[in-house]
Amino acid sequence: MDSERLQFFRELLQAKIAELSGDQLKTLAEMTGNDERHADITDLASFEADRNFELRIRDRERRLIGKMHEAVRMIDDGTYGICENCDEEISEKRLIARPVSTLCIKCKTEQEKIEKLRGNRGGQTMRFHEGDSPVTNQEDFN
């Protein structure tokens, strides 16, 4: 990838990091400065549910910020846009859609097929190599 496109992705990632970090700080300020009294237990339950939902969103954003910092580091060391599995270039179209992508669409699709067969939904990245079978033996299904 040429230096102009790398600069485009660096700026895209840095802008998104700044935006999400601002959201994190805003949420923190709102939650620490909010000492509401609730009229009844239903109001309190609703408030707590909303607060938990907000915290889950911010946790996901925090993890995404970490991935974005890693992508910027990859730009710096020259590995951005290279599939970590097959070493082929990740399409620019995919990187625009998801700038933190570390797998090309072919490898990501294969990874998802394997995860589906194994029932792996824990968000863990599974490494595989071309020709690997997603099922190692029949005991996997017993």
Image (tube, grey):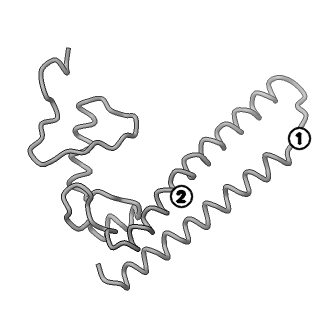
Reply above or below: 142 against 86: above
- Name the image quarter holding the N terminus: bottom left
CB-based contact (under 8 Å), mark 1 and mark 2: no
- Under mark 1, the amino acid is Asp
Viewed as shown, does residue 77 lie left or right of 26? left
Q: Residue at x 12, y 24 (%)?
A: 137
- Judging by the rendered image, the residue that carries numbered circle 2 is 65
Q: Residue furthest bottom?
A: 4
Is 131 placed above or below 24 here? Answer: above
Q: Residue at x 87, y 24 (%)?
A: 40
Residue projecting furthest to the front: 77
Element carrying mark 1 = loop
Q: In the rendered image, which residue does mark 1 sit on?
A: 35
- The answer to which of 45 and 104 lies nearer the viewer is 104
Q: Amino acid at mark 2?
A: Ile
Q: Residue at x 74, y 57 (%)?
A: 26
Q: CA distance from mark 1 to mark 2?
A: 29 Å
Q: Quadrant of the C terminus?
A: top left
Q: Quadrant of residue 21?
A: bottom right
SS at circle 2: helix
Q: From the top left corner, tell me how far across and down residue 102 is, in percent.
A: 33, 58
Q: Callout 1 environment at 10 Å: few (<14), some (14 to 19), or many (20+)?
A: few
